[in-house]
Image (tube, rainbow, N blue to C red):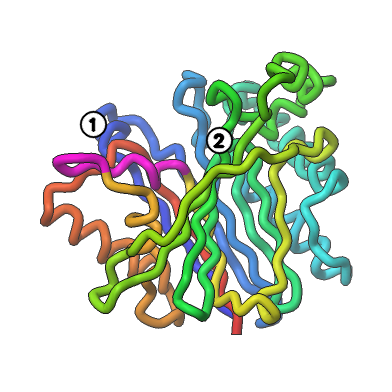
Amino acid sequence: MQADHFFTIGGWHAKQGSPCEDYALSGVEDERFAWAAVSDGCGGALADTDIGARAHLQTFRRELRMRYFAGARVDFDEQFTRDTVRGLAAHRLLGAHDDDYLATLVGVAGDSSHASVCIYGDGAFLVKYRTGMSRLMWLEWQDNVPLYLARQLSPQGAETFFAQMDPARPVATLDWDVFTRDDAGEAVLQNQGSDPVTIDRSVGAYTATFRPADEQIEAIAVMTDGLHKFRGETSIDAYDMASAFTNFNGTSGGFVKRTALAVLERLHSRNVRYADDIAIACITFD
């Protein structure tokens, strides 16, 4: 198993002299358990959400490793949410403002027999199959108002969020694109759609589980919503960007970093720009 990650600042933040609000981490434990995660601080919060993005992933890493080394299977359930919120609360004691923790968290963890994905807030993940097919999925919330994990730092924060939702409409939908690659390595869209999803209020996240060996899964990548904000003369489809960022030439060492840097260099030569920060992290299965 391999894991790697990459993040970089977008054009808007660079011009403003403000920090990158995206962050990514990944790791492999004992060569048999891999994890990867990305976080995106909420720019609209007018706060230091780059702090929150890092706190989310440091807490995520600690909770995963504690479970793994205790011999427990990692699932993103109610207890995982509770423990992660406690970890964020401990970070908050360092003096940061509550709004600094308004950030997303998209993570994947597991091995070839069992892997779990979570989306707290918004973001995307991609499942890459050995057949050559890939499936990109991202979460869209009602009225574009995501449920951040940090809302649970306040008593009844999640319940207040759900109470404000229109019960006649889905709280969230999972949008998806299925694509393959042609001989030149370009993405070819095969199908796309959108499905309403149920968000377990006790978890506060979209979750999914996979059996990589049985399902012929080669890799699972997680990404922030900067994936949707690449612009040339026209906007570029998210599946095109996801295809480019996961078209790895080998998976040794810093395979995500190598691929991402090469993609961004090619885009720059074509005058394609990205206003938003972007983060991607990936695990591969033997």
Q: Give the residue type that dot 2 points to.
A: Glu
In the rendered image, which quarter is residue 93 located in? top right
Residue shown at the point (55%, 21%) measured from the top left:
143
Relative to 100, say whether 86 is above or below: below
Residue located farthest toward the top when viewing the structure as drawn: 164
First reached walking from the N terminus: tag 1 or tag 2? 1
Q: Position of residue 170 (x, y in %)?
A: 67, 29
Left or right: 84 as drawn, with respect to 137: right
Relative to 46, say whether 256 is above or below: below
Q: Position of residue 67 (x, y in %)?
A: 83, 62
Left or right: 42 as drawn, with respect to 76: left
- Residue sitting nearer the eye, 5 or 271: 271
Left or right: 54 as drawn, with respect to 79: left
Question: Real-space Cα distance between discs 1 and 2?
Answer: 28 Å
In the rendered image, which quarter is residue 39 located in? top right
The answer to if 93 sits in the magenta stretch is no
Relative to 66, say whether 40 is above or below: above
- Residue sitting nearer the eye, 263 or 253: 263
Quadrant (top left, top right, bottom left, bottom right) of the C terminus: bottom right
Residue underneath mark 2: 140
Q: Give the residue type that dot 1 points to.
A: Lys
Asked whether residue 161 is in view, the answer is yes
Q: Secondary structure at mark 1?
A: helix
Q: Secondary structure at mark 2?
A: strand
Residue shown at the point (65%, 76%) measured from the top left:
215
The magenta segment: 225-235
Residue shown at the point (70%, 80%) measured from the top left:
214
Residue underneath mark 1: 15
Quadrant (top left, top right, bottom left, bottom right) of the N terminus: bottom right
